[in-house]
Amino acid sequence: MIGEAFLFALGTSGALLFLAAALHVPITAVTAAVAVIVALIVATIATLRGKPSAATSDDRSRLATILALIPLLAVIYTAAVVPLNDFDGRAFWLLKAKGIAHDGSIHGPFFHEGEVLDPRNNYPLLMPMNGAAILLLGRTYDDTLLRWLFVAIFAAMLSLIHRRLGAWPAAVLAWVPQFCAAQEGGAVSAYNDIVLAAFVAAAFFELAFQVVEGERPWRFGCWLAFLALTKNEGLPLAFVLLIAGAFVFRRRLLPALAPLAIALITLVTWRRNIPKGGDEDLAVLLPTLPQKLDRLPGALAGVGQHLVAPPWGLFWFAVAVAFVVLSLQRRRRELALSAAVIGGGLAFYIAAYTVTTWIQPDLINSSADRLLMHLAGPALFALSASARSR
Amino acid sequence: MNVRRAALPLLVLALAWRSAPQLLELVRGAWQLHRLPFAARRARVNGPLPADVAKIKAAIPYDEPIALIGPGDNDWPAIFANYYGYPWRTRLYRDLDEYRLATGDPARPRHIATVSDAGARVATYPELRDVRLRAGGRVVREGVLKPAPRTFFIPLAGSVDGPPPDSYVTEADFANDGPSAVQVRMTLLPEQMVRTLTIAPRGRASFYDLVYESFGIMEVRAVRVEADGPLRAGIWYVNRGRGEAEALPFVTAPAGGAFRCPVMECKVWEVSLLPPYAIRSRRFAGDIRVDTKSSFLFASTNERPTRFLWPQGVAP
């Protein structure tokens, strides 16, 4: 429960601060404190309401819980001693957090090339807003305090999986090398992929457990909004989940659209008023897919290689087996839901790798392991479902 | 049923087979660092950049923008310098040429810091230029050395940059073929800054950028050379960026006369050989005649490659 509440609070505070900053509210320690308090209250209300799904004896396995804690403890010890040394975290995300904390704004000189070069100027700002809040409240520009946020997100995601799927799926997640040990994208880094993975998992569980726990489309919509505001990849993943949500909630999905719409309007409006930064514009590139189909085999092969690469071990192989088991058992709902979200996410990434203007193998090798993290929640759901009887 | 119940524990084991050694490596790395103070840990993990950036910030006033000059092929050291330096104001230039090209841009910072994977430090433009010139090697490698008078003037001794790739230097070689050391005294004119050097018996002194190496400035000047023994010497006015070189004469007496510009526009130079040793130049086209009793006059073309026109009777 606490993990889910933390993730919801994280999303809420980042989104609130982004909305406030977009409306030209100065981002100060006071604003940050108010946003954090409001987010904590909202998250508590949002996660306390509703009936949690029942746990079996397997779900509560003490051995599995202890096993899940071992990588987490290793990550905590590493984070306490070893200074942050990742790439994207320092170059993009935390630099933005410093810029926001310094300028007290997302319209200031930092985002208008007036202070330093911000290499991906128009990246979404949910996590940099949270980072800025920590820097402002901690009265520092040092990343020592800030990096704990990412360790906490790993712990929160483990807690979320533990609560929703059980102790063994949580142990599986804890031991996936890409999550627990990867220097680029894992819990010891400050990449936003782990945040996106946690939000995708949380949004997915709103769909997966809707029958057991009751419908909360507005909360589903909030997770989708958090996705869109966290990373560029979050928006297509939000759409994939939205399509899945349309089948689950049907007309009752409408309340979910409100938070996502607010997030998108705010993001687009802010982006229109700042220099673009150096990233590819997939909205422009994706329509060129039919002309670049000759690059599709390279994209498929590249992603395929990373599904069985060392950072993922046997994880995705086991997920494939889980799909076979679920289909043999004719558990259509679990199979369809998890396969749709994983398939949709993979299809988007393969399309992006096909149309990219980067050197295709370079882009795949530098990002595929991290992007696969985003789909870990639905994959763990499939693993968990296949390991249970109906 | 049992197989299914065992599936997830088995998967945990399989994953741990991969991740446990990596986690152990992380913990071992942390264990090796945990007794060190934070700054030392940061230096071990992040390299010299965080500490170097702190030194740069201490050396340059907070409100002054800094030009971060990168190694050319890689922006990332400068971006990480920004990460550790922020809040500060910087402008990133991929290399010295990019900074050079921004001459005249009011936003170009006055203060310079060079940054690469090896670290970062405050620097000056002439210093960085010199590092590059020194590493690049000479244009005139096997120049012919001629017997030089005991006292002579180098009429045009320059160390200046034009738009990239034009980079002008004076290359020089002095050879002492005799059995005893020769003292050489060089005087930069008109400042009259003096630098002396001793050339060992059968030794040689060579310069890839005579003015900056000897006097630490980037200017266009003249140099008086005085030696207490016989020397062979060669002096060349060189465009390093284009690999072009023109030999310069040993000037010993005033000379002037008529010059005919072979191109659209030329420049006539007047180097006073007597105090206060002024150096003047002006443009001309076609023919010009300047007579003098105390100066040395010559002309140069304003088009590339630079060609020199010497007074009658003077040759390099």
Image (spheres, coloured by chain):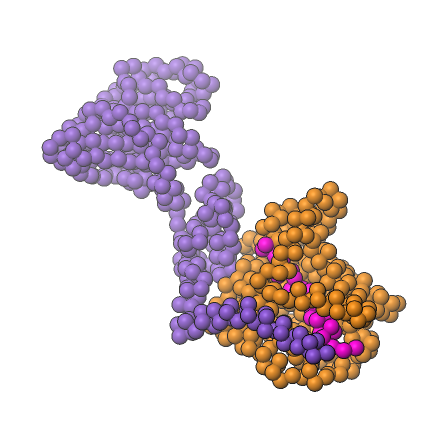
Chain colours: A orange, B purple
What is the count of numbered marks? Answer: 0
> Which sits in the foreground, A289 or A35?
A289
Instruction: Residue A231: say if magenta.
Output: no
Q: Image point 60% across, 65% down: which residue? A: A313
A300 sits to left or right of B95: right
Q: Image point 48% across, 60% down: which residue? A: B85
Residue B241 appears at what percent x and percent y?
42, 33
Instruction: Residue A380: say if magenta.
Output: yes
Q: Locate the N terminus of chain B by quadrant.
A: bottom right
Q: Main secondary structure of the magenta part?
A: helix
Residue A236 appears at what percent x and percent y?
73, 58
- One can see residue B71 in this view: yes
> Which sits in the foreground, A268 or B6?
B6
> Which sits in the foreground, A389 or A292?
A389
Identity of the residue furthest to the right in this view: A251
The image quadrant that residue A40 belongs to is bottom right
Residue A63 appears at what percent x and percent y?
60, 83
- One can see residue A187 in this view: no
User: Where B252 sits versus A31, above or below?
Assistant: above
- Which span is picked out in magenta? A365-390
Q: Image point 60% across, 46% down: which residue? A: A359
B159 sits to left or right of B86: left
> Which sits in the foreground, A102 or B256?
A102
Q: Image point 75% across, 59% down: which residue? A: A344
Residue B45 appears at what percent x and percent y?
44, 64
B263 sits to left or right of A150: left
Q: Locate the C terminus of chain B by quadrant.
A: top left
